Amino acid sequence: MDRAQMLLLGLPIFLLCTDIINLFTPPPPKPTHHHHPQSHHQPKPQPVLHQQPLDFPTQKPSGPGGIGLGSNVNINFCSSCSYRGNAVTMKNMLETAFPGINVFLANHPPPLPKRLLSKVVPVFQFGIIGIIVAGEQIFPRLGMMPPPWYYSMRANRFGSIASTWLLGNFFQSFLQSSGAFEVYCNGELVFSKLQEHRFPSEIELRELVGRKLSNSRIVDGVGGALWS
């Protein structure tokens, strides 16, 4: 085995060992703040200048943004699809357009069958890689002869291990993704990427949330008038 084959074979094994180490490595400890000893030289006291506070006129929020006070908007997005940047952009836009509104970001998990299958994929990855590396000892202990496909995979050991690792990661990423970007305003759905199959624009989302907030305020006003 020449150096090129050793390098190609060692690369996926190194990546595998790195992933295993990262799974069992504890989080780094929090940095401790060291208090520096105070010097014995005390500075000379300086005269204190009494300044009167300056009075600035306070500005009250005006415009349609006031209707967002106390309202909640939930943006549930697919974190494995790299949608966090879009969610943060929409969060900043809504907080600017509707002062006082609370915008919460959360991951939208995939359906339960996909989540269960994503847990099974690493088991198949390690199983196939283990058979490729030590199949000559595994099959005799099971009381069976190695199948023909084992010899073909054994002949191209590096290609088989690399293909198994890359395909397994691809399927796991696919199973963990939901493709969702769901926006809720006070518990009511205002936009769904799973239904529309597209992302909302900033203007569109601002209008949808503003319309929902206006309708909620009108309903609350009518209900308060009826009870009074």
Image: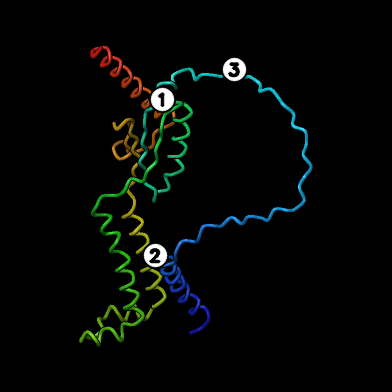
Pair 2/1: label in front: 1
Question: Horizontal placement of 76 versus 18: left or right?
Answer: left
Q: Secondary structure at mark 2?
A: helix
Farthest left residue?
143
Residue drawn at (31%, 36%) of the image: 192
Cβ–Cβ below 8 Å for labels 1 and 3?
no
Q: Residues within 10 Å of mark 1 (few under 14, many from 20)?
A: few
Residue to which mark 1 is pinned = 69
State the image coordinates of residue 58 (x, y, percent, origin top left): 56, 19
How far apart are the two marked residues, 2 and 1, measured between alpha carbons? Answer: 48 Å
Name the foreground residue: 144 vs 45: 45
Amino acid type at image mark 2: Leu
User: What is the CA distance from the residue labelled 2 to the residue labelled 3?
Assistant: 62 Å
Would you name the residue on which mark 3 appears?
57
- Given the image, on which type of amino acid does mark 3 rest? Pro
Mark 1: amino acid: Leu
Q: Quadrant of residue 43?
A: top right
- Mark-to-mark CA distance, 1 and 3: 22 Å
Which of pointers 2 and 3 lies earlier in the amino acid sequence? 3
The answer to which quarter of the image holds residue 156 is: bottom left
Question: Relative to 163, does residue 142 appear above or below in the rendering?
Answer: below
- Residue located 30% across and 40% down the image: 194
Q: Residues within 10 Å of mark 3 (few under 14, many from 20)?
A: few
| Foreground tag (1 vs 3) | 3
Foreground residue, 186 or 40?
A: 40
Q: Which mark is residue 58?
A: none
Rendered view: 6 above or below 117: below
Helix, strand or loop at disc 3?
A: loop
Query: In this figure, which residue is indicated by the disc labeled 2?
Result: 166
- Indicate the position of residue 10 as horizontal and vertical percent values: 47, 76
| First reached walking from the N terminus: tag 2 or tag 1 | 1
The percent coordinates of residue 147 (x first, y second) are 25, 81
